[in-house]
Amino acid sequence: MDDLLRVDDKLTGDQKLIRDTVRSFVGDHVLPYVGDWFEEAVFPARELAPALGELGLLGMHLEGYGCAGTDATSYGVACRELEAGDSGLRSFVSVQGSLAMFPIWRYGSEEQKEQWLPLMASGSAIGCFGLTEPDHGSDPSSMRTSAKRDGTDWILNGSKMWITNGSIADVAVVWAQTDEGIRGFVVPTDTPGFSAPPIHKKMSLRASVTSSLYFDDVRLPGSAVLPEVVGLRGPLSCLSEARFGILWGVVGAARACLESAIAYSQTRVQFDRPIGGFQLTQEKLAWMYVGLAQSSLTAFHLGALKDAGELTPRQISFGKLSNVRAALDIARQARSILGGNGITLEYPVIRHMTNLESVLTYEGTEEIHTLVLGEALTGLSAYR
Ligand code: FAD
């Protein structure tokens, strides 16, 4: 597909190399198989993680401890190319790098960093991030999972829900109420009392592991707590990192849907002509491209702000809200252009479309990011 606005011309040589490397990895190692993974509801994490580590994609925008230390735009471009494969693949990389490694890197002790980050950067250890609970999603401040001191140890009790990578993780970053406020804990998943059963019957992000986490008197040493942060700003700062990857990633899913719809419209003949020759189809394709190009420009702009150290959570909310909505609209339009074929896994569109329903909800729902913008515009908070 022509990059009419030549948005990618803005990429540096290194960023183009990352784009092309990830795109070719996804083309060779993901696209031929991902329809089957989705159908069978599997994600071959143990095979993919070392390969992703080898490419430097795990914790790629972090410095030191075996991480690649790229700029933020490079991280965004990698997320875009991963999600052109599948949102489950990008979710794996986002959770590993932005939600599990970032809090250890940013708020962890030297011992925690040295123990976990090199293993996670190479893909030999997998991480997850436990914030959401069965009864507390959009409002994590009301979480019930708690950690109480017992001498120098901590005792963790409670549960988490909808945790990406939960059942396959070697380490979980778990957020819990304490007497001092919300704190983060680095929990090896083989600690007695920890369990992580998978959540089944998902119709979205099927090529991604989603789990519950249970903590039944999980005894942790004093050294398990993240020493450098207290309060909700800890998990929220991780979410900002991951949402940045999402607002880039969904551009890839949208692009894959538009490319599929254009190719289909050029070859599918009805009433003796390719359906792409009908004005109604062209109107859909034109608006899909407008949405895609606008999302791309938004991602580049926010990438530049992040690289300049100026990106704010409100700007990230803008990008997550507008780019996920645009991607979902594009996926739904593409689905209609493919007619009956649009509902099969022979084409990528229905897979992206159902995946994007999860992306619309996780990392702050569409409504919550709308309220963030509403508050920014009016100065009035409408959450409660
Ligand atoms: P709720 O908060 O109950 O919301 C239900 C509806 O009410 C939504 O439409 C919401 O927008 C609306 N609503 C809520 N409050 C308001 C309000 N004040 N005003 C208007 N509308 C409101 N969490 C993790 O911690 N780690 C993970 O790795 C993770 N991975 C996930 C993977 C998947 C596939 C999914 C689906 C979720 C994942 N999540 C994860 C959880 C995700 O972040 C939550 O689902 C999300 O925050 C919404 O919470 P909820 O599902 O409890 O919905």
Image (spheres, rainbow, N blue to C red):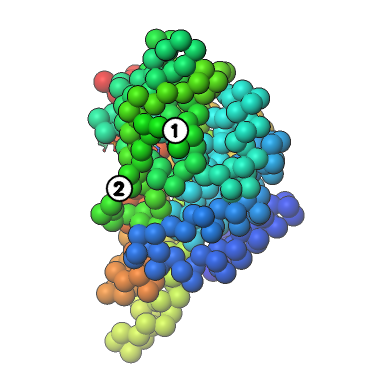
At 33% from the left and 89% from the top, the residue drawn is: 272
Amino acid type of the residue tagged 2 in the rendering: Ile
Above or below for 275 versus 358: below
Looking at the rendered structure, the kind of residue marked 1 is Thr
Disc 2 residue crowd, few under 14, some 14–19, many 20+, Cα 10 Å: some
Q: Earlier in the sequence, mark 2 or mark 1?
A: 1
The quarter of the picture where residue 3 lies is: bottom right
Q: Is residue 291 visible?
A: no
Distance between mark 2 and mark 1 Cα atoms: 21 Å
How far across and down, in percent of the image, does residue 241 sit?
53, 35
Residue drawn at x 49%, y 12% as measured from the top left: 152
Q: Residues within 10 Å of mark 1 (few under 14, many from 20)?
A: few
Q: Quick check: is the Cβ at mark 1 less than 8 Å away from ligand 1?
A: no
Judging depth in this view, the residue of 48 and 329 nearest the camera is: 48
Which residue: 60% across, 36% down?
116
The disc label shown at residue 199, or none: 2
Residue 55: horizontal and vertical position, in percent? 65, 54
Q: Is residue 48 left or right of residue 138?
A: right
The percent position of residue 243, horizontal first and vertical second, equals 48, 39
In this picture, residue 72 sits left or right of residue 169: right
Which residue, given by chain and number where applicable, does mark 1 sit on? 191
